[in-house]
Image (spheres, rainbow, N blue to C red):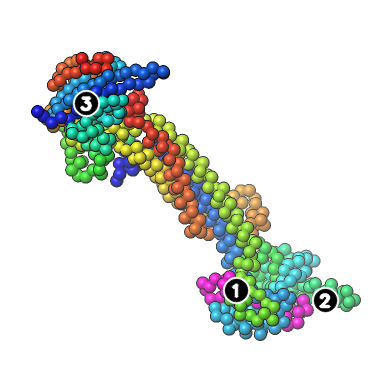
Amino acid sequence: MSEAIVTARGLTKSYLSGDRHIAVLRGIDLDIAAGESVSIRGESGSGKSTLLNLLAGLDSPDAGTLAWGDDPVAAARRAQFLGMVFQSFYLIPEIDALANVLMASRIVRAPGEAERARAKELLASVGLAERAKHLPAQLSGGERQRVALARALMNAPKLILADEPTGNLDEHTGDAVIELLLGLCASTHTTLVLVTHNATHAAKTGRQLFLRDGLFS
Amino acid sequence: MPWYLYLALKQLFPSGRKFPFFTAISILGVALGVAVLIISTSVMGGFGHQIRLMTVDTQGDVQVRADGFINNPDEVQAQLARIPGIVATTPYAQGMVGVLHNSKAQYPGIQGIDPARIGRVVPLQRYLTPAGALSDLDDDSVILSVQLAGLLGAQLGDKVEVYSPLLIEKLKNDSVLLPRELRVVGIFEFGHQALDSTVVLVTLRTMQDLYGLGGAVHGINVKLEPGLDADEAAARINAALPPALHLHAVSWMDINHDFLFVLQFERNMLFFLLTFIIIVAAFSVTSSLLISVVRKTREIGLLGALGGQPWQVAACFCCQGFIIGAAGTLVGLGLGFGVLAIRDDIVHLFTRLTGSEAAMLRFYQFSHLPSYPDPAYISATIVCSIVISTLAGLLPAWRAARLQPVEALRNE
């Protein structure tokens, strides 16, 4: 049995909408092993992003337990335990592509030569070695998402959480990004949780989950 | 470098872009406040400094005065000479006279000085126009201040008539005292309106004759060793002089206490009021940074998602306030000292354009705009500017730190 990267038991989460409590997650149990790639699909509002935020430790569940590896979720571990890829890329516009990749490392510690070399290597691995000094505004959508991908991998995390990473890309570019994401995760033995609406992309992962009414079906 | 400082620098000075408008305006706002503070306090300090120099140059460091007259000035001077720290002394007598020349009358103050000793206490020769010499002053001559000479139309070698108040005393006794005719042997210019327009210098003997003082004087000017505190020296002299003489020593600061107090008070008030320029600039920094927090909500969420702590996010915006403050202070110091360097050109240009040169001399006393950048005020300006600017970043920082990453990232 591979090492457990994520262990969730009975996760529930509800939101207050006006005077009504809307239950988004109704007791999710989830085990994800090291190196696994898992996709989560579901209709809009089914709780995919809420679950991803819980898994990332950005939000806390109303009930249930969640562990990263053998230890409970802790914000202080987030920078090194996981990397995130978002639909809207979220690159920092004032700094170039290389600096954006290095930002993930910078938050942990001041980057040295080794970190710079790794950032350049990651940019090269996503095919952007020549665009390292370009600002996000000078990159296309696909290129920006590839920079975000390199950033997510910068601290060599154990887990990548990708929230609809192709949502803002055309089909062809989206396919390329997913291939790249899966390929990089596989080559670095990084666990991947991919939230997507796209059945084709989901099918490329090792395990497909479907979220309906706050539960996996 | 911590990431929040790095990001603060990058947000103010982004890679590959020219100087951003927000940064330039914010820095300029603080710089203008700092420059105005530097210029104003330095000029005000200059007035005070000029007063000090002029007072010491004309009166010495300390004056020993009697309740009435000092009837035995030589004896008092001998006693003063024995007090450590006193370099030289010179007696003086002073009063008011009428001066007449070519039917033009003026009523200046008159100082009786000892030409043989005065040079050891005050550098009077330095202020005489080149044609005149202090050594030419004898009992039949007078040295006029430059504007007084102009008002009387008197030049070197001319004779002026001097009327003393003793004339009135004589008239009461039905006797007549003729005015004293004195030859102009020198003209001095201190660069101070009050002194340059209302003072004549004569020998002590002439003054004693004009006022009927006999051998008495009004006081003794004292020159101290360089670096000695005048107040402390005055206290030491007071302790050393026998009480029976009824003499008291006062420092130049005490003599001009009220004027120096007003100058200091004005300078403090000016500093207080002009600090508001920096506060206003700081409000604009706060406003711009608050807009930045709203605009960068998702980036702030991202920083949280990447592992940044709320205090680090707050520090990023505080650092921006600090950097704006530090840069603005640096630019402001350059601007302030730059303007101070060419202040006379600016003032002369302004007075020429407005035709107000004479008015400026009349009201501001000095022919040149003085400047004395006081290190204490400069330090206070630097500290105030940086602290206020850093505080300006606090509210945006607090707003940014309160943003929950998950909420911020949802903010599409």
Q: Secondary structure at mark 2?
A: loop
Give the residue drawn at x 20%, y 41%. A115
The C terminus of chain A lies in quadrant = top left
Question: Which residue shows up at 9% across the image and 28% down it?
Answer: A1
Could you say where residue B173 lies in the image, as x and y percent from the top left? 89, 77
How many angstroms separate mark 3 from mark 2 (CA)? Answer: 118 Å
Q: Is residue A80 magenta?
A: no
Does residue A134 lie above or below B146 as drawn?
above
Report the chain holding disc 1.
Answer: B
Label 2 and label 1: CA atoms lie apart by 43 Å
Image quadrant in which you'd find residue B121? bottom right
Q: Is residue B341 above or below residue B63?
A: above
Q: Are marks 1 and 3 on the same chain?
A: no
Above or below for A23 versus A85? above
The residue identified by callout 2 is: B178
In the depicted structure, whether residue B331 falls above or below residue A5: below
The reply to whether residue B382 is in sight is yes
The reply to whether discs 3 and 2 touch (Cβ–Cβ < 8 Å) is no
Real-space Cα separation, disc 1 to disc 3, in angstroms = 85 Å
Graded by Cα atoms within 10 Å as few (under 14), some (14 to 19) or many (20 or more), the crowding at tag 1 reads some
Q: Which residue is situated farthest in the left direction here?
A: A1
Which-is-in-front pick, marks 1 and 3? 3
Front of the two marks 2 and 1: 1
> Mark 3 sits on what residue?
A8
Question: In the image, which residues are magenta?
Answer: B207-235
Kindly identify the amino acid type of the residue bearing the numbered disc 2.
Answer: Leu
Residue under the point 37% across and 36% down: B401
User: Where is mark 1, residue-wise?
Assistant: B235
Residue A169 location in percent, x, y? Answer: 25, 21
